[in-house]
Image (cartoon, rainbow, N blue to C red):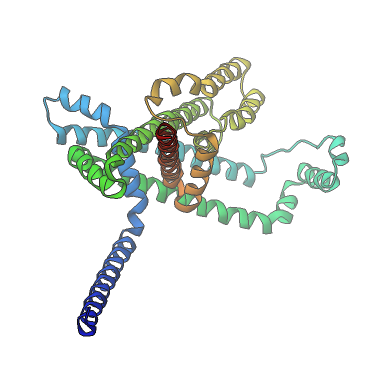
Amino acid sequence: MPPSEKTDDQRAFDRRVTQAAVRLSLLALLTFWCLRILAPFLNPIIGGAVIAIAVQTPYAKLTGALGGRPKLAAVLMVLVALLVLIVPTFALGASLVDSTAGFSDDLIHDQIKIPAPPDSVAGWPIVGEQLHALWLGASENLESALVKLAPYMKDVGLWLVSSVGDLGMGVALFIVAILIAGALLPNGERATRLADKVAYLLAGPRGPKLADLAASSVQSVTRGVLGVAVLQSLLAGLGMLVVGVPAAGLWTLLILILAVMQLPPTLVLIPVIIYVFYTSSTVVAVLFAIWSILVGLSDNVLKPLLMGRGSAVPMLVLFMGSIGGFIAGGILGLFVGAVVLSLGYTIFMAWVDESDVDGGDAATAATEVR
């Protein structure tokens, strides 16, 4: 090859490399801008997509029942979802406000009486003596004890106010996610085709299969984990509202978080049952205890009914996803994190299993050739 021709080839190669670098840089810059613009809506968008995938089956049945009117079915699904979210939220929020106001009024009128601590408390290791002294002081003069705790209570109060504000923002983002899901539902077929195309570009011929597996995993986790958690928390909150448990909204939220993490709701319900036995009649307390036990055991019945098809996800994955999502995105992130991490785990395990199969087939083929 002549030197001049080789130089021309090098120049053409350098020009192509430069053009590719410029195009990739512009593409990366455009992607960065898009993600930065969508960052405040990222959790609601993912949540809306998760909700849309989860309710595909009832949405299809409702569309058929309405004579093939997908937009009307989507509107009805959105209205039902908003009612399911907003009505319990307002009821439990009102209960929390009433309980706080009642506690404040009792505190002002000196109607709160704290019993004296048992002598055995002083024998507890490390904190026994201090706790006994504080408890005894509160039982003799609650006002002076609160004055001593004022610096700490201020920090706790600020944290509670911030948490309530975050909870309100989380409910608002949930409403946005439901509206996004309503917009996605009538375009389900188009979205499925787009997902298959993107999956094919990313993973080749096995891409559409992974896309179906992803949709199945989302439906499985959403129904069998998140759906059960919501039902358990709503049933527990309803029982606490009926028997008049103070701050029922707060305990319901704690039960919801525990249920998403796959921890038993009885961690919250047992202390509440003890409180009801102390403050209510025996009949009411026994009925509430039975109701709470049924709520705690309901996941054994609800999960097989709602789980559907899909791979099982370890509890540790759900726990880490819900905790990480809650820290990153509040109450909506609690759900989105569990679903996204479960989805990643399912796809990763499918890829690993397929690689094992491919490796086994290759080894078998090599053995047969020999």
Q: Is residue 233 visible?
A: yes
Q: Is 104 left or right of 21, judged from the image as shown?
A: right
42 vs 103, nearest the viewer: 42
For the image, the number of numbered tags is 0
Instruction: Using the image, determine if residue 66 lies above or below residue 118.
Output: above
75 vs 280, nearest the viewer: 75
Q: Quadrant of residue 123?
A: top right
**Which residue does the image show at 53% across and 33% down from the upper left?**
262
**Which residue does the image show at 27% across and 41% down from the upper left?**
205
Q: Is residue 82 visible?
A: no
Q: Quadrant of the N terminus?
A: bottom left
Looking at the image, the residue that sits furthest to the bottom is: 4
Q: Quadrant of the C terminus?
A: top left
Percent position (x, y) of residue 103?
59, 42
Percent position (x, y) of residue 108?
63, 47
Percent position (x, y) of residue 16?
23, 73
258 vs 113, nearest the viewer: 258
Percent position (x, y) of residue 48?
31, 43
Looking at the image, the residue that sits furthest to the top is: 283
133 vs 36, nearest the viewer: 36
Q: Quadrant of residue 132?
A: top right
Instruction: Using the image, determine if residue 141 lies above or below residue 67.
Output: below
**Which residue does the image show at 24% across and 80% down from the upper left?**
6
Q: Is 188 left or right of 37, judged from the image as shown?
A: left
Q: Quadrant of residue 118?
A: top right
